Image (spheres, helix red, strand yellow):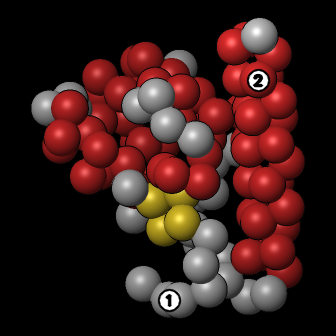
Amino acid sequence: MFFVLQSILDTKSKACYAFCVKYTLLNGGGFLKTRIAQLRKEKKITQEELAKAVGVTRQTITSIEVGKYTASLVLAYKIARYFDMTIEEVFDFSEEEL
């Protein structure tokens, strides 16, 4: 039962992320705020450690943290799972500018 519920939540989270990224980019936002740097500090891990855990380079993590790169759905999911959170808890889809 737990795994079915988790699967449903994961699917809904992925769908929301995909919709929100498209909405943000189409409406001139062009960036998404993230809590990745804060979460890394709380866990006391480096960008390099997170990058290795999710299968990307440190530069990719840096670019996501500063808003120069929007994570793919798959990468956003891996990062959220790494922190045992939902995508929406890690990535901010509000329309406010940085």
Q: Residue 15 placed where, x, y %? A: 85, 48
Mark 2 residue type: Leu
- Asked whether residue 87 is in view, the answer is yes
- The mark that comes first in sequence, 1 or 2, is 2
Quadrant of residue 50 within the rendered picture: top left
Dot 2 crowding, Cα within 10 Å, few <14, some 14–19, many 20+: few
Residue pictured at 14% horizontal, 32% vertical:
44
In the drawing, does residue 81 fall left or right of residue 75?
A: left
Q: Of helix, strand and loop, which one carries label 1? A: loop
Question: Which residue occupies 59% across, 78% down?
Answer: 94
Nearer to me, 7 or 41:
7
What amino acid is labelled 1 in the image?
Glu
Residue designated by label 2: 5
Work out which quarter of the rendered image holds the N terminus and state it.
top right
Name the outermost residue toward the front.
Answer: 1
Residue 74, given in percent of the width and then of the height, sits at 72, 33
Residue 97: give its label. Answer: 1
The vertical placement of 12 against 88, above or below, is: above
Q: Quadrant of residue 88?
A: bottom right
Res. 53 mark: none
Q: Residue at x 66, y 77 (%)?
A: 30
Q: Quadrant of the C terminus?
A: bottom left
* Residue 62, above or below 10: below
- Secondary structure state at the residue bearing disc 2: helix
